[in-house]
């Protein structure tokens, strides 16, 4: 029993990261994913704050799930999530002000993030606190990874360099932000400005979804072929078992 | 009816309790974070003061004003405790331009006030307009602050530039008034 | 007075086209991508969003400036706004169900989904964060919601045409829709040169 429970915990944790990634598989929470991914630091910051909000709301809703009756589920969840978002917003404004001014409205928009409300209604109000906690961490990590992927592509291709230190000021060296020049040099510049603009965000997201769809299709095709091959082999074996004296099929062209 | 009423009370009470707890939590947190936010703003202002007048070493406390845009001013002193000029803080929004906070330097005498640089604490023009107003209006003005560079508001972000111009002119007239002119 | 009216109109144009809600500011993308290729339901959802955003701004603006700020509680705005919006969506749904059941049925699940539409909360929060006065807040609301309606209808029409063409298998559906949205956003980029 313990082994099964541990496997279930483990599965609900890992599922949120890759297999049921909230952004790339369920296509939820796309608004911040396109808006804050212009720089890598903003994406990491948004992912971390999102994980806090998701964890807090999952745990609290799961802890209160026996107390809140069915009819008032939605307003109660909304109040809980809004409280956590306001707390995170105020802490961010006080201690990481650069992140607060970069994220702008999108910090408040975490309240209506489909992932937070979706996880609350689909998972947290039916499972224990520990399961909800794992689910929250899994989904949070998955979302952060997805944001990082998009932001890496957009920042490297769009500005030609990675900048560290603008938002997380403890990363500054000698008071200056660290730049990692990749597509840019002192006299040459191969960055494509389009990727920093909103149009580029859509393109990057669309191409990533297409690549994932391609891999999913290939996997589906391979599984379908295997299944057909197995069914064919099973049919052959059944035919051979039914009439063992039948000669193997000869090519029909010999008679013409 | 009694059964229903009891249920309504229970549900309503639960919601009210939830709301009250959340309000208390948030208000309590505000007591802790508000001073830190104030400190952040003062730090940003200190950086701005040093950019507007580069010889600034110390400055006075905020002197509150009342005006359309002006909120307060600080007197800047250099290393020899001499007054360099006044730096006005202005806040305002206009049309599509969101709340813009500026630091404006004015120095000189009442008869001949000299305009100083502008420093953005918050640029209210969003997106491309923010970049445009900085590159086409504020940077040329900061290179040589004068009435002629102040007057060229048609720069591709006219609403934002007109707002900044109005703030600077109000700062100048307030300086003249406080130095005894008219 | 005249200058204010001109500023009001310019603000509507700005929020409708130049700073478009879906393609530039990135609010409301979940429903934008999920609307599919049904033009009629896209139009009815856009109309519902127009109602909700306009009424939400009408209600939340006085609440912020005449209740929260004088009480010294500007930080409670998120909680209050989202509760107001949730109630408003319920009320709007109730009225639509009563006066036009056909519209209610065509909206289906999209009506309660307007509560989680980033555009509604985004517009209301922007208005209070940016210190707009009442006229410009309404311009923001009108421009944003009509821009949303416009973009969602155009997008549904384009997707209806796209579905009848053969696309590479990996691009079918959501990836192609996103790239189409990217092309629409690129078209709007040309408007940022308007010297407003």
Image (spheres, rainbow, N blue to C red):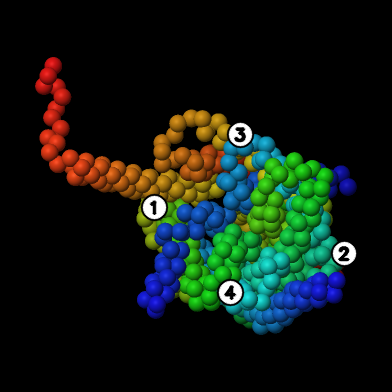
Marks 4 and 1, how far apart at CA:
49 Å
Q: Are marks 3 and 4 in contact (CB under 8 Å)?
A: no
Q: Which residue has dot 2 on it? A: B182
Give the percent coordinates (x, y) of residue A88: 61, 73
Secondary element under disc 1, as helix, strand or loop, is loop
Q: Is residue B21 visible?
A: yes
Q: Is residue A168 visible?
A: no
Q: Quadrant of residue B154?
A: top right
Q: Chain of mark 1?
A: A
Q: Which residue has dot 1 on it? A: A184
Q: Chain of mark 3?
A: C
Q: Which residue has dot 4 on it? A: A62
Task: Name the mark nearer the viewer: 2 or 3.
Answer: 3
| Other residues around mark 2 within 10 Å, as few (<14) / some (14–19) / many (≥20) | few
Whether labels 2 and 1 share one chain:
no
Secondary element under disc 4, as helix, strand or loop, is helix
Residue shown at 87% from the left, 44% from the top: C2
Q: Are marks 4 and 1 in contact (CB under 8 Å)?
A: no
| Other residues around mark 3 within 10 Å, as few (<14) / some (14–19) / many (≥20) | some
Give the percent coordinates (x, y) of residue A169: 50, 72
Task: Name the mark nearer the viewer: 2 or 4.
Answer: 4
């Amino acid at each position: 029993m313990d082994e099964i429970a541990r496997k279930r915990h483990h599965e609900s944790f890992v599922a949120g990261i890759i297999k049921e990634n909230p952004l790339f598989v369920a296509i939820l929470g796309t608004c911040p994913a396109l808006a804050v991914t212009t720089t890598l630091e903003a994406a990491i910051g948004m992912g971390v704050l999102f994980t806090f909000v998701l964890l807090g709301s999952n745990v609290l809703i799961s802890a209160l799930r026996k107390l809140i009756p069915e009819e008032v589920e939605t307003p109660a969840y909304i109040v809980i999530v809004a409280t956590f978002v306001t707390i995170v917003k105020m802490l961010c404004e006080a201690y990481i002000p650069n992140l607060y001014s970069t994220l702008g409205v999108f910090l408040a928009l975490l309240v209506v993030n489909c992932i937070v409300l979706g996880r609350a209604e689909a998972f947290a109000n039916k499972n224990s606190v520990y399961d909800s906690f794992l689910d929250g961490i899994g989904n949070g990590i998955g979302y952060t990874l997805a944001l990082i992927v998009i932001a890496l592509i957009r920042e490297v291709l769009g500005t030609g360099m990675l900048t560290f230190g603008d938002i997380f000021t403890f990363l500054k060296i000698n008071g200056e932000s660290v730049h990692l020049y990749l597509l840019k040099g002192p006299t040459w510049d191969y960055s494509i400005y389009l990727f920093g603009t909103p149009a580029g965000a859509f393109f990057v997201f669309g191409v990533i979804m297409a690549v994932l769809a391609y891999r999913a299709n290939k996997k589906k095709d391979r599984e379908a072929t295997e299944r057909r091959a197995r069914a064919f082999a099973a049919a052959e074996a059944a035919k051979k078992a039914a009439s063992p004296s039948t000669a193997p099929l000869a090519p029909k062209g010999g008679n013409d | 009816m009694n059964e229903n009423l009891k249920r309504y009370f229970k549900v309503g009470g639960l919601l009210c309790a939830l709301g009250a707890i959340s309000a208390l939590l948030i208000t309590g947190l505000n007591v802790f974070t508000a001073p830190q936010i104030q400190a952040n703003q003062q730090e940003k202002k200190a950086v701005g003061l040093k950019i507007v007048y580069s010889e600034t070493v110390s400055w006075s406390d905020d002197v509150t004003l009342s005006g359309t845009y002006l909120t307060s001013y600080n007197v800047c002193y250099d290393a020899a405790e001499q007054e360099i000029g006044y730096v006005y803080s202005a806040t305002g929004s206009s049309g599509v331009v969101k709340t813009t906070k500026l630091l404006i330097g004015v120095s000189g005498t009442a008869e001949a006030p000299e305009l100083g640089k502008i420093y953005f604490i918050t640029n209210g023009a969003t997106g491309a307009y923010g970049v445009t107003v900085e590159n086409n209006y504020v940077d040329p003005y900061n290179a040589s602050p004068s009435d002629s560079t102040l007057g060229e508001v048609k720069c591709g972000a006219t609403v934002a530039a007109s707002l900044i111009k109005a703030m600077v002119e109000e700062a100048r007239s307030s300086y003249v008034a406080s130095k005894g002119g008219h | 007075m005249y200058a204010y009216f001109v500023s009001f109109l310019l603000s509507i144009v700005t929020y409708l086209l130049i700073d478009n809600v879906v393609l530039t500011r990135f609010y409301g993308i979940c429903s934008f991508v999920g609307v599919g290729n049904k033009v009629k339901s896209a139009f009815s959802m856009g109309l519902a969003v127009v109602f909700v955003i306009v009424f939400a701004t009408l209600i939340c603006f006085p609440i912020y400036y005449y209740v929260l700020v004088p009480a010294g509680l500007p930080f409670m705005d998120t909680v209050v706004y989202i509760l107001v919006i949730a109630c408003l969506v319920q009320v709007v749904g109730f009225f639509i169900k009563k006066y036009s059941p056909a519209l209610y049925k065509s909206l289906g699940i999209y009506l309660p989904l307007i509560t989680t539409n980033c555009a509604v909360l985004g517009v209301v929060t922007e208005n209070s964060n940016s210190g707009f006065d009442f006229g410009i807040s309404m311009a923001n609301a009108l421009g944003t919601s009509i821009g949303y309606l416009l973009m969602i209808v155009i997008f549904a029409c384009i997707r209806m045409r796209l579905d009848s063409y053969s696309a590479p298998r990996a691009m079918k559906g959501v990836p192609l829709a996103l790239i189409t949205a990217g092309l629409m956003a690129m078209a709007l980029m040309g408007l940022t040169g308007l010297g407003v």
